[in-house]
Amino acid sequence: MSATRPRQDIHGKDWNVLTSSWLEIMNTDAEVKTISPLEALMQTTSINRLALSSPLDQFAALRFLLTLLYWKADRVGGVQNLRTSLLEKEMPGEILNALKDETQHFSLFDKDRPFLQDISLNLPPKDKDKKSAAYLFPELATGTNIAHFHHGDNANLHLCLRCATLGMLNVVPWTQSGGAGLTPSVDGAPPIRVIAFGQNLATTLGLNLVPIEGPAGEPKWTGCFNPTDKNASIPYLEAFTWNPRRIRLFLEDIQVCWRCGDSGNPTIGKIVYSKNENTKQSDKKPFEWQDPAAFYGGGKEPFKTIKSSNEEGVACDKDISGLLNKDNPTSYIIETNPDWRNWQLIIPCTRGDMKTFDHRQLFLEGPFLDSVRSRIQSKEEQKQDRKEIDGWAEPRDTNPPKRDKKFIHLANKLFSHSDWAMFSSASFRDMQSAPAAFDIFSALFWTLPNKERPSKNVYWLVLKLMAKVPAQYRNLSDTGFNPVTHIPKRQWVGKRSQDKTNQAIIYPIAFPCGNQLEAELHKIINKNMRKQNPEKINWAGLCHCLEQLINRNHLK
């Protein structure tokens, strides 16, 4: 269910991260709405949970609300008192009144103190200093984050103010390192984090608002972030607003948001996004800070977080097995809520070369360590049955009907060399885009009786494939290999051992469609043709298998 998103009643320049409506929530009646963070804190008992689609957004938004509460907890006698009130389902009025007095800190386009931005940057910036707004989100493709399926028009990307707000909040907990001296956030590469969630937002906030040892410090809501002392213990309000980038947003005209598709509202386009030398650690050691939601290695490296960086381990949850090591302390949140049984793990997956390959979330029920063990064990059991993770199944009926044999026979009998050349030039084109080949195809296809006509798309694809092989390999053959059976059902990640006793992780692969299917079949057929003695190809059998897969909606 999508959230109700009212049109903005204010000009973009008045956008306020605390009081403007950008936070998607689900109330206790299962209605999804978009409200402001201040409204959310006023309605904690009637809100079931935050309803943001990305697990990274989910954590970043919750962390923002918690930071506000940590900031003003002294108004009710400290963090523990505020935590107790929330667990008793009551948001103290003193907290809300204190936050209402601080709205000036959260204006996104304030000329003097814009939220999480640095006005000391040289303005207007040179074109070479402007970057895509996609840099605000680790899961969006940019010039340096290439492990994505689609980059789109990266240079002209626009974000609505709701998405821009989420992007700014993501910078603090999820920023990873990059080229040209771009340092990660205070935790280093983004770690695995945990959220304890309750039956409503009040309980969720109370469970995750845990007392933290050490000084509180002051939050850094604006300006070029500069830690009080990088070589000492980091105050927790500084850590919660730790900004490893120098950023400046610029309000632009109404455009379509590239991330959520919202239209009719102001957007931001290119931004200034540069390194912050103040957050660089000269000796490359972790900062003296332990995030209450993260997990740490303990021992001689008490400030080193546990991360998911092994792509092979992600498929069967091996990347969370480090949370079971007895030498590793659990997170503060788990230690403070030992009897709680509802957990959400946020797992950002970043390889050793700092390229993001996955982000995911896991919902666990029961005592935390027991639920992690159960999760890993069930994945191991699933791994034993290889058939359960095939991405698609071959048709059981592989014996082609007479119509398919007749079609292949007529194509070989009637088509001239120039006809086959037309089909060869039509590769990766549909019928409307290759009119010459389509005319030849139609003359043959419509000679078949109505009851014998299969999908036009199947025969069109098969003729294009036949055109790519020598004439002697286009002939009708009841034997030979069927290329469909060679399309992979699983993808192996990592190296497989020779004895297969310790095979690498496998992912299921869906049956391809469109140009991807044509490319896969081309590759399989070309591999056969490069053999010293190529096998004959069962073209009629290929038609029959593809027709059945179409009927299963594997191919469109």
Image (cartoon, helix red, strand yellow):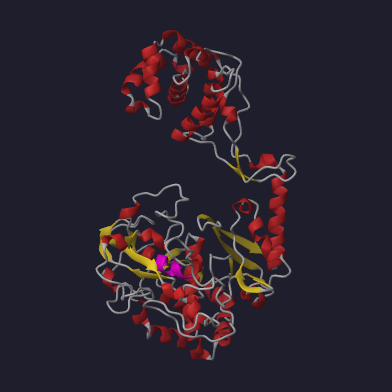
Give the residue furthest to the top: 413
Q: Is residue 166 magenta?
A: yes
Q: Is residue 364 magenta?
A: no
Residue 416: where, in percent of width, then height?
Answer: 39, 10
Left or right of 168: which side holds 205? right
* Magenta residues, start to end: 165-172
Can residue 161 be seen? Answer: no
Q: Residue at x 68, y 39 (%)?
A: 387
Name the one closer to the observer, 535 or 375.
535
Q: Quadrant of residue 493?
A: top right
Residue 350: where, in percent of width, then height?
Answer: 54, 58
Helix, strand or loop: magenta stretch: helix
Residue 104: where, in percent of width, then height?
Answer: 34, 81
Name the one closer to the observer, 44 or 221.
221
Q: Residue at x 64, y 42 (%)?
A: 389
Q: Residue at x 36, y 60 (%)?
A: 133
Circle count: 0
Q: Quadrant of residue 162?
A: bottom left
Where 470 sits versus 142, above or below? above
Give the residue furthest to the front: 283
